[in-house]
């Protein structure tokens, strides 16, 4: 490499290869990433908990021999715990909480050789499709700093898009990997339910809505990382069907002639922005040019019922979250320690009885069976990732008389992603399109349950046909 600045936009696989060939040392990679974070973070506010001393120490000790040995990485400040480092989940209630152990996912990330340099910003408890917690302030989109980077993994997406690190952890309970991937022009895969572990604290959470994985710059990074982290942990309540071969072997493999159904329509009461409609139509045509069988089909099941049941599940989940943290901290949550939206969700969740919660779960499980039957006819669904381009910061702020305003405004922004959390299916946002304002517009591909392999094969084919690696946001390394 001519200089360390040239490393900024190499993907994690390429950086690991340089370490393996002894062309660069892990400490050099880590120091360069720290320099980029320090240079870019004042403009973006993506990293809220620096772990620079820990990272430098890890880079100078024996690094596990994994697929990403010596490569810098960031953790989202939600669910994933690192022993001895604070975990806030974007909440003032947890601003002084220090984790006592590593999450199993973090154990596996370390075994993959990745060196964690810090934690990224997230909205409080992951409840919004933006990253604007009162505790830390807004993360800004590197393509336009007046706009949202998406959420709740917006800090990770902004960091990867800007070149701070080649990939970063995210989790996705309603679209929280895929939405920021769309807003920031990176790849975001939500794996199949239970593909990655959530222990030792959680067997699952919100009855299986969230999934753990990452925001990446390349398809091969996403596949190789999933190989390194996936698989059941001891005592998990259930696990995903094992893949027939490593996911990395799907990257570059012939996807064959896929049956791809696409739609640009959401619920009748939601208008999809023309830029998002155009992106799907454009990518549908690209898929047809690549030899796939592509057909426009109104695929959405009863999305009003989905929204109602999902909302009830989320209320129960937030009420559980409050009890979980009160038990772990030994403290009682009061309204002044959380944001107005979170407190409103907690209160409503506490009034949601167990029967109502389980009825909503039953409805979502019925929906899952309906969707699974549709996937006997189609291999992949293609939809917009979001119904709008990245919106202005502040769009989801609560109103003085309506703390839930932002939560319900979210439904018009993200009508396409939550169905995959309800059904547990894998889905990905692929950065193939930018609009006239040079804002990324992700396109959303949904695979059948347990079938990340097809998504990786298709994503690699699309990446080769329309590369995105050379695109640079205005705020970048």
Image (cartoon, rainbow, N blue to C red):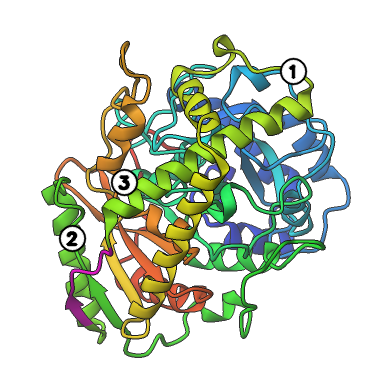
Residue at image coords 24%, 69%: 299
Q: What element carries label 1?
A: loop
Q: Are marks 2 and 3 in contact (CB under 8 Å)?
A: no
Q: Where is residue 441 in the image (x, y as percent from the top left)?
A: 26, 50
User: In the image, which residues are magenta?
Assistant: 294-301
Q: Where is residue 370 in the image (x, y as percent from the top left)?
A: 37, 72
Q: Position of residue 81 (x, y in %)?
A: 73, 39
Q: Badge 3: few (under 14), some or many (20 or more) residues near its Cα, within 10 Å?
A: many
* Mark before the other along the chain sequence, 1 or 3: 1
The Cα atoms of the two marked residues, 1 and 2, are separated by 47 Å
Q: Give the residue at the far left of this rendering.
A: 274
**Numbered mark located on residue 331 in the image:** 1
* Mark before the other along the chain sequence, 2 or 3: 2
**Numbered mark located on residue 414 in the image:** 3
**Numbered mark located on residue 300 in the image:** none
Q: Which of marks 1 and 2 is in front?
A: 1
* Mark before the other along the chain sequence, 1 or 2: 2
Nearest the viewer among 329 and 225 is 329
Is residue 300 on the magenta stretch?
A: yes
Nearest the viewer among 220 and 22 is 220
**Numbered mark located on residue 264 in the image:** 2
Give residue 77's quadrant in the image.
top right
Q: In this view, does 366 lie above or below 336?
A: below
Is residue 134 on the magenta stretch?
A: no
Q: In this view, does 8 lie above or below 91?
A: below
Residue at image coords 25%, 75%: 261
Q: Position of residue 455 (x, y in %)?
A: 43, 73
Residue 253 left/right relative to 308: right
């Amino acid at each position: 490499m001519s200089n360390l600045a040239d490393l900024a936009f190499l993907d994690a696989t390429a950086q690991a290869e340089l370490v393996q060939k002894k062309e660069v040392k892990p400490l050099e990679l880590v120091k360069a990433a720290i320099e980029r974070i320090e240079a870019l973070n004042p403009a973006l506010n993506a990293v809220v908990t620096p772990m620079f001393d820990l990272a430098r120490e890890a880079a100078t000790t024996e690094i596990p021999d994994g697929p990403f040995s010596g490569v810098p990485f960031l953790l989202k400040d939600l669910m994933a715990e690192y022993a001895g480092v604070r975990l806030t989940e974007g909440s003032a209630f947890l601003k002084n909480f220090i984790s006592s152990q590593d999450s199993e996912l973090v154990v596996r990330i370390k075994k993959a050789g990745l060196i964690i340099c810090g934690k990224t910003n997230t909205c409080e408890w992951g409840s919004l499709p933006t990253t604007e917690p009162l505790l830390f302030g807004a993360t800004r989109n590197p393509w336009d700093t007046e706009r949202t980077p998406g959420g709740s993994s917006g800090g990770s997406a902004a960091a990867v898009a800007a070149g701070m690190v080649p990939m970063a952890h995210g989790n996705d309970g309603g679209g929280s990997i895929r939405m920021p991937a769309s807003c920031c022009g990176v790849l975001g895969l939500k794996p199949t339910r239970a593909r990655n572990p959530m222990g030792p604290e959680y067997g699952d959470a919100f009855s299986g809505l969230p999934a753990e994985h990452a925001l990446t710059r390349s398809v091969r990074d996403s596949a190789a990382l999933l190989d390194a982290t996936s698989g059941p942990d001891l005592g998990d309540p259930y696990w995903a069907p094992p893949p027939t071969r490593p996911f990395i072997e799907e990257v570059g493999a012939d996807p064959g002639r896929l049956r791809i159904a696409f739609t640009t329509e959401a619920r009748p009461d939601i208008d999809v922005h023309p830029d998002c409609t155009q992106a799907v139509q454009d990518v549908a045509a690209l898929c047809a040019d690549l030899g796939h069988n592509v057909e426009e089909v109104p695929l959405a099941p009863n999305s009003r019922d989905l929204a109602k049941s999902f909302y009830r599940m989320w209320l129960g989940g937030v009420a559980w979250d409050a009890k979980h943290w009160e038990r772990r901290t030994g403290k009682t949550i009061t309204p002044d320690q959380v944001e107005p939206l979170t407190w409103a969700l907690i209160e409503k969740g506490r009034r949601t009885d167990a029967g109502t919660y389980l009825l909503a779960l039953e409805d979502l499980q019925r929906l899952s069976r309906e969707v699974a039957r549709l996937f006997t006819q189609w291999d992949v669904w293609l939809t917009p990732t979001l119904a709008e381009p990245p919106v202005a910061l502040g769009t989801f702020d609560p109103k003085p008389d309506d703390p839930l305003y932002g939560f319900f405004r979210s439904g018009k922004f993200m009508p396409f992603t939550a169905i995959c959390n309800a059904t547990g299916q894998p889905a990905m946002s692929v950065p193939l399109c930018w609009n006239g304002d040079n804002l990324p517009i992700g396109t959303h591909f949904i695979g059948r349950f347990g079938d990340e392999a097809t998504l990786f094969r298709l994503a690699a084919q699309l990446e080769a046909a329309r590369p995105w690696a050379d695109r640079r946001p205005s705020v970048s390394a």
